[in-house]
Image (spheres, rainbow, N blue to C red):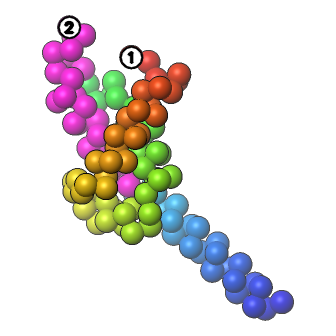
Amino acid sequence: MSIFRTGLSLVLLFTMTNQVFAQAISKDYQKNCAREQVVEHQGIKGKALTENDFTAYCACQAEFINKNASNRQVNELVMDPNVKPEWLKLIELKAMKACIADPKMNT
């Protein structure tokens, strides 16, 4: 029974650690995402867009990355949120397609 408790404790610890990383990537990633989106969409729709206009989209994208990146990849982003490795570009492309198709997104 004690081996079971130890194993269960390790699983819970790992899960909680992974959630902390996910929250860290989410916060920093969303800030960078919103800034990038403002720059990319300057002059579109005939109005000045702000970072707040991309909150829902960047939250969707961060959640997609949290679900689809490995622990090593998440750790890489936590250590340097400004890094843009090739694997991230691929996941971001998939996230963009999924998030734009999401009926909760207003465009």
Q: Secondary structure at mark 2?
A: helix
Quickly name the residue at label 1.
107
The span from disc 2 to disc 1 (Cα, nearest Å) is: 14 Å
Return the residue found at the far bottom.
Answer: 2
Chief SS of the magenta region: helix
Quadrant (top left, top right, bottom left, bottom right) of the C terminus: top left
Left or right of 5? Residue 38 is left
- Is residue 56 at all visible to an observer of this figure? no
Where is residue 78 drawn, in percent x and y? Answer: 33, 62
Ranked by sequence position, the earlier of labels 2 and 1 is 2
Query: What's the amino acid at mark 2?
Result: Gly
Where is residue 3 drawn, in percent x and y? Answer: 75, 91
Could you tell me which residue is drawn at 34 percent across and 29 percent down? 54
Q: Secondary structure at mark 1?
A: loop
The crowding category of the residue bearing disc 1, from other C-alpha atoms within 10 Å (few below 14, some 14 to 19, many at least 20), is: few
Could you tell me which residue is drawn at 43 percent across and 57 percent down? 69
- Is residue 53 at all visible to an observer of this figure? yes
Where is residue 89 drawn, in percent x and y? Answer: 28, 48
Quarter where residue 46 is shown = top left
Query: What's the amino acid at mark 1?
Result: Thr
Front-lying residue, 106 or 97: 97
Where is residue 47 drawn, in percent x and y? Answer: 21, 11
Q: Which residues are magenta?
A: 25-49
Residue 38 on the magenta span? yes
Quickly name the residue at label 2.
46
Quarter where residue 99 is shown = top left
Could you tell me which residue is drawn at 26 percent across and 44 percent down? 32
